[in-house]
Image (spheres, rainbow, N blue to C red):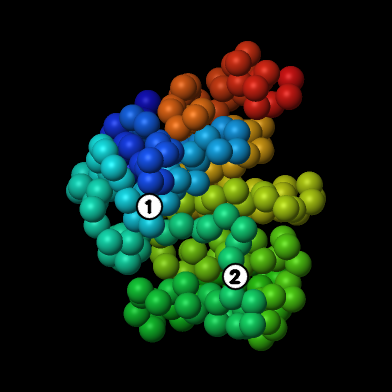
Amino acid sequence: MIARPLLQVTRLGCHYGPIQALDDVSLTVGDGELVALVGANGAGKTTLLRAVSGVQPASAGAILFDGVDITTLAAERRVRLGIIQVPEGRQVLGPMTVEDNLTLGGYSRTRAEVADTLEQVYAMFPVLKERRGQAAGILSGGQQQMLAIARGLMARPRILLLDEPSMGLSPILVDEVFEKVAAQKAQGTTIFLVEQNAFLALSVADRAYVLEAGKVILSDTGEALKTNEKVKAAYLGL
């Protein structure tokens, strides 16, 4: 049973010029859920996240957040509603310190909220506290991914959009990052996760959708999709 819908995408279409990247996509993320979106490279996963965060305009359909139509709302206003994206490839600001990166993540919050959230983030990510005065660019890949997630949390998200958090990381660091993701879910954060490592994504997801050539072709619980023969053959290498 799906929790109270927080994000509802209905018959969404997106184009890059004449190329249709998403076609008639519908999905729901319930309040407090971790929902995964899996699929091959080029399936349209990142485009969907960009459409939800307002970076990519929709050419058809609707996006509702907490019952309100945000389809044409500016990205900056979506941030203030609590829709926060952690981008693919981390995109930390390398010359700036760890703490400056974090503070920038909370630009839409009050000074008191930033100070309070910063202490919470440091408690969750002790390595970032240790390196708070260092340039973000000298952190390891795993530490930069932690910083990117922590920067997103600084905005106090109502929904956290995670785009390929395992990209470019060693298996040990992937496990560490996903432990943090699972911990956030356990604390009640709603998460919409795009991840090419389908087995890992389905292992942590309450529910999941499979995207292929811009269309949703399957949806079920994470555990059910892990045992689906088509998913196993196409995405799990089994």
**Number of marks in the rendered image:** 2
Q: Secondary structure at mark 1?
A: loop
Q: Position of residue 156 (x, y in %)?
A: 41, 64
Report whether 227 appears left or right of 31. right
To which quarter of the image does residue 233 belong?
Answer: top right
Report whether 106 appears left or right of 3. right
Identify the residue position indicated by label 2 in the image: 92
Disc 2 marks a residue whose amino acid type is Val
Q: Nearer the viewer, residue 164 or 57?
A: 57
Quadrant location of the N terminus? top left
- The dot on residue 165 is none
Q: Residue at x 32, y 66 (%)?
A: 76
Quadrant location of the C terminus? top right
To which quarter of the image does residue 80 belong?
Answer: bottom left
Q: Where 138 falls versus 50 (above or below)?
A: below
Res. 205 visible in picture: no
Q: Secondary structure at mark 2?
A: loop
Q: Residue at x 72, y 60 (%)?
A: 142
Identify the residue position indicated by label 1 in the image: 56
Alpha-carbon distance for marks 2 and 1? 21 Å
Q: Position of residue 192 (x, y in %)?
A: 46, 45
Q: Residue at x 43, y 78 (%)?
A: 114
Q: Where 122 falls versus 228 (above or below)?
A: below
Res. 94 visible in picture: yes
Q: Position of residue 21 (x, y in %)?
A: 43, 38
Disc 2 vs disc 1: Cβ atoms closer than 8 Å? no
Report whether 226 appears left or right of 30. right
Disc 1 marks a residue whose amino acid type is Gln
Residue placed furthest toward the top: 229
